[in-house]
Amino acid sequence: MAKPKVAFYWCASCGGCEETIVDLAEDVLKVVEAVDIVLWPVALDYKLEHVKAWQPGEVTVAFINGTVRLSEQLEWVRLLREKCPFVIAFGSCAHLGGIPGLANATSRAEIFANKYHRSPTIDNPQKAVPLISSSVDGHHLDLPEFFKDAKPLDQVIPVDYYLPGCPPPPENVAAAFTAILENKLPPKCSVIGVDKALCESCPRNETKPDDFTITRFKRVATSTPDPEKCFLAEGFLCMGPATRGGCGERCIKGNMPCRGCFGPTPDTLDAGLKMISAIASHGEADTEEAAKAFADSLVDPLGTLYRFSLPASMLRRRAMAGAEQ
Amino acid sequence: MIQLTIDGKKVSVEPGQTVLDAAREGNIPIPTLCSHESLIPYGACRLCIVEVRHRNKTRLLASCTLPAAEGMEVTTNSEKVIRTRRMLAELLLARCPESKAIRNIAAQLGVEKTRFGKPHLKDNSAIVGTDGCILCGMCVRVCNDILKIGALGFEGRGASRRVVTPFEKPSEVCLSCGACSFVCPTGAIEHHRIRLHKPEPIPAEFEYGMVNRKPINIPFPQAVPRVPVIDPDTCMNFRTGGCKICEDNCGVHAIDHAQQEKIEQVEVGAIIVATGFELFDSRKLGRYGYGKLDNVLHALEFERMSHASGPTGGKILTKNGQPPKAVAILHCIGSRDENTNEYCSRVCCMYSLKFAHLVKEKTNAEVYNLYIDMRAFGKGYEEFYKRILGEGVHFIRGKCAEVTSAARTPEEKGKLIVVAEDTLLGMTRRLPVDMVILSAGLIPGKDSDKLGRILGISCSQGGFFLEKHPKLAPVDAINDGIFFAGACQGPKDIPDAVAQGAAAAAGALSLIDKGKVVLEPITAEIDEKRCAGCQLCVANCPYGAIEYNKEKKISIVTEELCKGCGTCVAGCPSGAARQKNFEDVQILAEIEGILTAS
């Protein structure tokens, strides 16, 4: 029997998810032994026509990472969905929108202005921005459309499984491969991780006191957390209580509070909102001013509470009038 | 027991007691100056001498230092004893001719005059009164042995002997307790020469400082249990480790200075909260002069003054001891006022009428009641109001603007002037009075917040405890098994407080009687499969219904305690806590339904 064929594709992504395949180290050989990688833009040269030429079902599984940001990416993922029986959203960006998803806090016009007008390394006196179709001196150029929103994968195509994490831990990737190869697949639409929040496996959870209150949030940039104690009880905003576990507590072991890359637990719609109500009930403020100071001490609440999940959350994006978009 | 004969009378005493003790046991009088039950006998004054038979001879011995012995024969009134005592009295009289105490005891012994001249004594005036000190040393002994202070001592020998403080300067170690003056048989101590620090009076809290109390006292006449308490801040024993004179004096040995405050844990099924109220602090409204002007009293001060067991024995008196000729009673102090408390304290109108009646009855003074509205709402209250109107009490509708002592006219001089707008006459009035009574409102106890947190009950606007339902459950707290009685739940008068107290007792009894409790149908639960044990819900639960199970590493809702408020559900960051019948999926489906329909 021929080896199953596998495709990797990336949308708006940093390349970290590709790196995690490499991080399989010698296990990558087992993968290569077991499957044929037929598409991997980061490593292999391949064109759209080749994929179009695949027979449906010929390639078993597509691992897609990154946020869907451009029309080109949409075309590719639709094509892969058409060709492959299994599509796996790989990493936080494909799962929830990820870091590129924070662009939903601003507008396309603002992003272009920042990138093409205000950036100090850009010399752009005509104030030009990329256009879908443009002609210069009789030469015609088509560019992919830059969408209004950054979208997680399941907002544009149906997704069979999710491998969360920024990037997904190599152990989880290896386990996913094994599951596919041994045909021991979990129910459709499952997220590969555990169903409980991170606190369950957090080595610091035992140090959490029965009751604690926070008057001001501390930041890892300005104070060093105690390497043993629960971050939240110490006043550092840790997303652990609202975040799916199974990541191997990589950040915790590095003395960093959980940043929430595994996304919300199975029964919650919006980890950010859940975290707000959880910490609000542990904030201490007797007066209106103290309450404001407490709220203000959480610098960049959107970027902290929705660092990886803004496009997939109930908020999705900042509401904007037509002209702003 | 030891048996001895005194003046032919057989007396038996415990071993270790003195002949003086035995004589007192047998009601045989022996004069003494330097004997005190708290002090070890010293035999200084020698007036207690008795004649004791020893074989064929008799001897004169001081009875206060003579241990009683079996078969001893003692005579206290023989000619020899009387003659010697008279000689002693003459000598004492020669030393202290001016002392009243000495003259009295000498007179008792039949001595009016002394044959001896006043000895040349070194001036003793620096410390104790020159005339009167008989060098019995009781002051020295009480200060050193009993109070363990040691501010006094003897100096010199023979004719130069005298009682002094170190360097004859007012003593720094003296705690101004006054025990030396108290025990001095001749009243010779001039205390201000001994002490450096002035004695501080201990104001009686229950009488609002209008009189003073002792470190050991019964806090108020109706105290339950009616036993004295020791105030450790002022009791000499807690300051020096000495004294304990009260222990010696207590006939049944009930006083124990080593007793400590104890916290006892009692497991109960129902709690009745009856922590009462506090009086609004009239100092907060400086314009009424409370704390600054004399004869401005708050309601409870006047209540004590008018009480038969109070500091004046029920007489209504101004600071100078005279009954007032005019009294103003200002209603709504700290009530019905947006700047202090918006609520009506309910009881002030009626107690103000009672005060008006008492003043009228006891002093026949002019009484002015300055009110906003008269609220005589209870049974028989309107009738009482009518009766007071008939007694000639003046009622002025208007809130007092200020109380001042700045007189504008000669008749206002030396008076308190109550300035108010009379809204019925439409004019400003200045009432010169001798006494102002501030009918202060009722406020919640200052630690009711803390108690609320301990019991898991909340406070309503104004800070009084919040009942479960204002009409249907006015006695119950939101938590099962907790009931309110009296003013802790809101200002109320005695009949209302008694009624609520009875209802609270019945509520508690019904729980005990039934032996079972009815649970809320809609409670929260924590999904074992989802809970990560982050414990954030534990402190969030206002009913203390959530516990962290260390073995299972999850939080668990105690269904019996859960009231289904949903706080844990809202605060659960991982969605493990759920409210029965109000689950997220249900609510979202409802929202979806509404949105689709429109």
Image: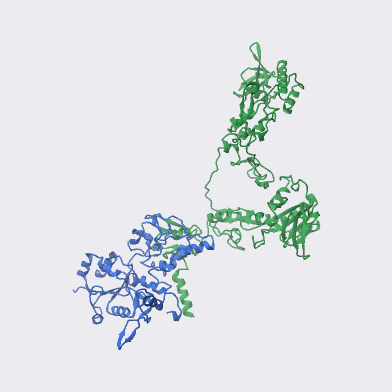
Chain colours: A blue, B green
**Rendered view: B360 above or below A166:** above
Say which of B157 and A296 sits in front: B157
Quarter occupied by residue B309:
top right
* Residue B150 can be seen, yes or no: yes
The structure residue drawn at horizontal position 75% and vertical position 18%, both measured from the top left corner, is B115
Compared across the picture, whether B392 is left or right of A154 comes to right
Number of residue marks = 0
Q: Position of residue B301 (x, y in %)?
A: 70, 50
Q: Position of residue A67 (x, y in %)?
A: 34, 74
Q: Position of residue A118 (x, y in %)?
A: 39, 75
**The N terminus of chain A, quarter of image:** bottom left
**Rendered view: A133 above or below B229:** below
**Rendered view: B80 above or below A28:** above
Compared across the picture, whether B593 is left or right of B448 comes to left
Q: Position of residue B552 (x, y in %)?
A: 39, 57
**Rendered view: B141 above or below A315:** above
